[in-house]
Image: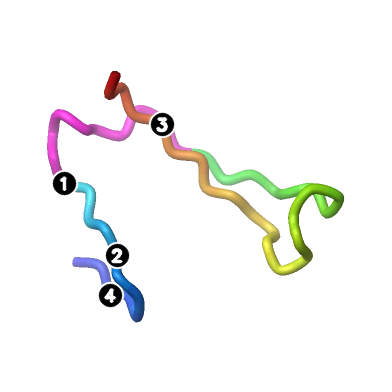
Amino acid sequence: MLQCKQKCHEHNEKEQAIYALGLIKTKLSIFIEAIQYLIILINLIE
């Protein structure tokens, strides 16, 4: 179970299975300095 201070969404349905997950470092020229990484999540829902 997720423990969040803010409202969180729990992903637990088989038909919405996660296909791929990645963590990438951001470019400072695109994002503000406080955002250093992005989580990329891919599922197969059309």
* Residue carrying label 4: 3
Residue 44 falls in which quadrant of the image? top left
Give the residue type at disc 1. Answer: Asn
Say what secondary structure mark 4 lies in. Answer: loop
Q: Quadrant of the N terminus?
A: bottom left
The residue segment tinted magenta is 12-21
Q: Residue furthest top?
A: 46
Frontmost of labels 2 and 1 is 2
Residues packed near mark 4 inside 10 Å, few (<14), some (14 to 19) or many (20 plus)? few
Q: Residue furthest right?
A: 29
Q: Tell me which label, 4 or 2, sits earlier in the chain.
A: 4
* Residue carrying label 1: 12
Q: Tell me which label, 1 or 4, sits earlier in the chain.
A: 4
In the rendering, which numbered label is found on residue 42? 3
Q: Quadrant of the C terminus?
A: top left
- In the image, residue 29 lies in the stretch drawn in magenta: no
Say what secondary structure mark 2 lies in. Answer: loop
**Percent coordinates x, y for residue 40 in the rendering:** 51, 40
Q: Tell me which label, 2 or 3, sits earlier in the chain.
A: 2
Give the residue type at disc 2. Answer: Cys
In three-dimensional space, the C-alpha distance between marks 3 and 1, rounded to whole angstroms, equals: 15 Å
**Residue 44 falls left or right of residue 11:** right
In the rendering, which numbered label is found on residue 34? none
* Chosen colour scheme: rainbow
Query: Residue 28, relative to residue 16: is it above or below?
Result: below
Residue 34 falls in which quadrant of the image? bottom right
Frontmost of labels 4 and 2 is 2
Give the residue type at disc 3. Answer: Ile
